[in-house]
Image: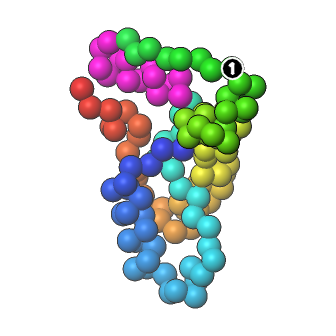
Amino acid sequence: MSLTSRPDTARFMAHVLTSFAPEDLEWKKFQIEGDRKSPLQIKKIAEKKLQKPINAEFVDYQENTALAMKDFAAIMGKTVEDGIAVAGTPEEVKETIAKYFPDWNPSPVDAFIKA
């Protein structure tokens, strides 16, 4: 799952919009992410930072898929499980950052978790 803070996204976009000509940006796809972690990795980071266990509910993929058209949480779960909740491949993300803002240094997911 790709995770990027709003300030990091805004900083990236402000840099791009003020550094490139509009015609160089037209119809461009910006594949950026601050961090890429699975839900279980995020759970582990949060438990360590918060110093308490977090309950995680495991949902059957087929049951979740059947609910996806009616339930937003099911849609999100299916999106993550299907590998669609990412900005692109790690290589595509690196290429975008290298091309548009090589000095961009976004925060990792553990910076979002406050005790």
Side of 67 relative to 113 (left or right)? right
Could you tell whether 70 is left or right of 42 in the image?
right
Q: Identify the residue at image location x=66%, y=38%.
A: 68
> The residue under label 1 is which amino acid type?
Asp
Most common SS among magenta residues: helix
Which residue is pictured at 44% across the width and 77% down the height?
17
Residue situated in front as seen by the camera: 80 or 115: 80
- Give whichever of 105, 82 is nearer the camera: 82
Q: Quadrant of residue 53?
A: top left
Asked if the stretch drawn in magenta spans residue 48, the answer is: yes
What residue range appears in magenta? 39-52
> Is residue 90 visible to us here?
no
Q: Relative to 8, does residue 59 appear above or below in the rendering?
A: above
Task: Give how far across and how far down residue 64 sits, in percent.
Answer: 67, 28
x, y percent for residue 9? 41, 59
Which residue was labeled with disc 1?
Answer: 60
Label 1, secondary structure: give it: loop
